[in-house]
Image (cartoon, helix red, strand yellow):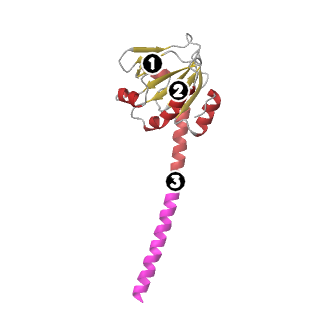
Amino acid sequence: MNTLNNANRTQYLMMVAGAVLVIVNMLLFQQNKQLKAMARDRVKSQEIKPGTRLPALSGLDASGKKVVIDYGGDVRKTLLMIMSPGCGPCKENMENWQALRRQLDKRLYRIVGVSLNQEGLGDYMNTHHLRDLPMIAEPEAAAKAAYNLKFTPQTFLIDSSGKVEKVWTGNLAGEHRQDIESLLNVRF
């Protein structure tokens, strides 16, 4: 009889422990969801806002040569792809950026890469077939501040006068993908 009570007691305690674990997991899931939303809102609040006029973007390319992306002298819009060789989401986004590079009319858009980390950039450019892309490997400090270059991946659309039309932070998927496809008239 005593063994039966111990077995029942053990079974009861296991059920209670299981229920507690389920509740704790549900609470952690909810907290994780809230933290992700807060992080997304924080990043969104730090993005350059549409309508902001940006100065020329300058820095060094992968070979150490000075590069300046100026607005006003080129009638095309500029699509900036902000990346970093060690950035996993940038690698995931590369297929989307490559689709944009293939589909955008070069007479209407110039596409420029900006790396926030020069380490490993040469291999990264080779791996992702970026050698023909103008690339700023090391943006100047003033440019980093003016463009608020803190996050990767980011994609900027800037008009020919240097005014920001749109900034997409993160992968070009879901709502970002729909937005960019409709705005730039592309499909990927």
Residue that mark 2 sits on: 101
Of mark 3 and mark 1, the one earlier in the sequence is 3
The three-letter code of the residue at mark 3 reads Phe
Which residue is identified by label 1? 142
The x, y position of residue 10, in whole percent, is 42, 77
**Residue 38 lies in what quarter of the image?**
top right
Q: CA distance from mark 3 to mark 2?
A: 38 Å
Give the image location of residue 63, x and y in percent. Answer: 35, 18
Q: Residue at x 57, y 27 (%)?
A: 103
State whether residue 128 is above or below residue 4.
above
Q: Are marks 3 and 1 in contact (CB under 8 Å)?
A: no
Q: Is residue 81 magenta?
A: no
- The residue stretch that appears in magenta: 1-28
Q: Quick one: label 3, few (<14), some, or many (20+) residues within 10 Å?
A: few
Tell us which disc is closer to us: 1 or 2: 2
How many circles with numbers are drawn on the protein?
Answer: 3
Image-based side of 54 in relation to 65, left or right = right
Q: Quadrant of residue 166?
A: top right
Whole-Å distance between the Cαs marked 3 and 1? Answer: 40 Å
Q: Is residue 15 magenta?
A: yes
Q: Which mark is residue 29?
A: 3
